[in-house]
Image: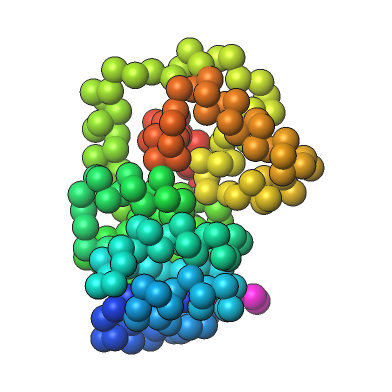
Amino acid sequence: MRKTRIMLADDHAVLRAGLKLLINAQPDMVCVGEAGRSADIAPLAEKLHPDIVLLDITMPQQSGLEVVAQVLARAPETRVLVLTMHAEEAYLEKALAAGAAGYVLKQAADQELLNAIRATMRGEVYIHPAMTKKLLGRMLTDSTSPEEGERTLSERETEVIKEVARGYTNQEIADKLALSVKTVETYRARAMRKLGLSSRAALVRYALKKGWLEA
């Protein structure tokens, strides 16, 4: 069985050691590297090509939110799962907008973190339950409704935008749907415009409401 290759990125050595023990104890996971400085994260991800970078967004040299985009630029097939102490919705929105595939609070139990890693590997967008409630709460009071735009989406636009919401890259979507990357980009932009959504974070909120992110 192929193991999920995970890289740890956190400035606390003790936390990294604990996470490494937890991950390596799983039959389907292995820790392949770790970084304690912001500047080292993206270069190491490019070198190791891990399946997942488990990333803290509170780093002393540079915000992990900036590092998310750097990792994805240098290792585009890697997914970034944010592990943070911040339960504020603003951090979640910024992480998703930067391209993070999931958001887990450090207070989460060990099993929840493992579930998040496995969900991310299935292509799902994993959001800590408490944060999901906050997103859904906002949607209940949000006056903006993209439903009318959704009715104008073509079948292909709908397929593409659902895959985007689930965290797949343009290349992965292109391979899955037998399309060119350029065509996927066109469908993606057109669907976002029709839905009136300007960011990936807004798309994830909408996808949660529509049930697109359910396994």
Image coordinates for residue 19, horizontal then vertical, percent:
35, 79
In this rendering, the count of numbered labels is 0
Question: Residue sitting at 33 percent across and 75 percent down?
Answer: 10
Which segment did they paint magenta?
Answer: 1-5
In terms of secondary structure, what is the magenta stretch mainly?
loop
In the rendered view, would you say 79 is above or below 149? below
In the rendered image, the vertical position of residue 176 relative to residue 20, given as above or below: above
Expressed as whole percent of the image width and height from the top left, the position of residue 185 reads: 65, 37
Give the residue displayed 24% in from the left and 45% down from the top: 89
Question: Residue 23 location in percent, x, y?
Answer: 43, 79
Residue 9 lies, with reference to residue 13, above or below; the image says above
Q: Is residue 183 above or below residue 141?
A: below
Residue 98 visible (yes or no): yes
Which image quadrant for residue 22?
bottom left
Q: Report whether residue 57 is seen.
A: no
Residue 32 within the segment the image draws in magenta: no
Q: Which residue is depicted at the point 29% across and 78% down?
A: 11
**Rendering colour mode:** rainbow
| Horizontal relation, residue 202 to residue 29: left or right | left
- The location of residue 70, given as percent across then percent down, is 47, 62
Image quadrant where one finds the N terminus: bottom right
Q: Along the horizontal axis of the image, is 188 left or right of 140?
A: right
Of 73 and 213, nearer the camera is 73
Depth check: give the residue in front, 124 or 156. 156
Describe residue 185's horizontal placement relative to residue 208 as left or right. right
